[in-house]
Amino acid sequence: MKFMRIGIGLLVVLILYIGSYCVLSALGENRFGQSGRARYGSTGFAASDIVIWYPKFLSYQADFMGVSSEIRTRGNGLGYFYSPLILLDRKLVHKTELIPGFEKFHQQ
């Protein structure tokens, strides 16, 4: 019986986690963002070269390229909390788009 309660409790938490993300995603929007690959001359500031999906109140980017070319994550606390669902959402539903004219910065 104790394991049944724990299992039901975990299922409820999982449903609340996914359900709350679905609401936040439904209220989200596409925004101009920076991949970090395109930079303004010698200033080092990243140019807005992508259109990326942001669920309401959440900020998370897993593949931002820093000034010294290291790949790092950036976001807010809620973004990190929901990061697995954000990544899945961006992979399956809200794909990140490259702004035309910035293709040369994204070639491997």
Image (cartoon, rainbow, N blue to C red):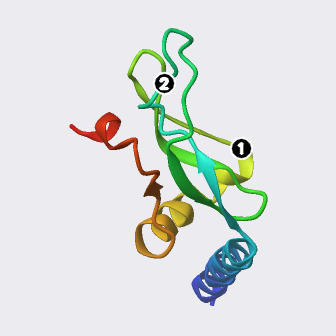
Which image quarter: residue 53?
bottom right
Q: State the CA–CA distance, disc 1 to disc 2.
A: 23 Å
Q: Position of residue 39 (x, y in %)?
A: 48, 24
Q: Amino acid at mark 2?
A: Arg
Residue placed furthest toward the left: 108
Which quadrant, please, contains the C terminus?
Answer: top left
1 left or right, relative to 49? right
Note whether 82 is above or below 76 in the view shown: below
Note whether 106 is above or below 31 in the view shown: above
**Which residue is denoted by mark 2 in the rendering?**
39
Q: Please tell me the numbered disc located at residue 76.
A: 1
Mark 1 or mark 2, earlier in chain: 2
Which element is circle 2 on? loop
Taking depth in this image into account, of 25 and 31 the one nearest to the observer is 31
Q: Position of residue 86 (x, y in %)?
A: 56, 62
At x 61%, y 83%, the residue is 11
Which quadrant, please, contains the N terminus?
Answer: bottom right
Note whether 82 is above or below 12 in the view shown: above
Q: Are marks 1 and 2 in contact (CB under 8 Å)?
A: no
Q: Amino acid at mark 1?
A: Asn
Which is closer to the viewer, label 1 or label 2? 2
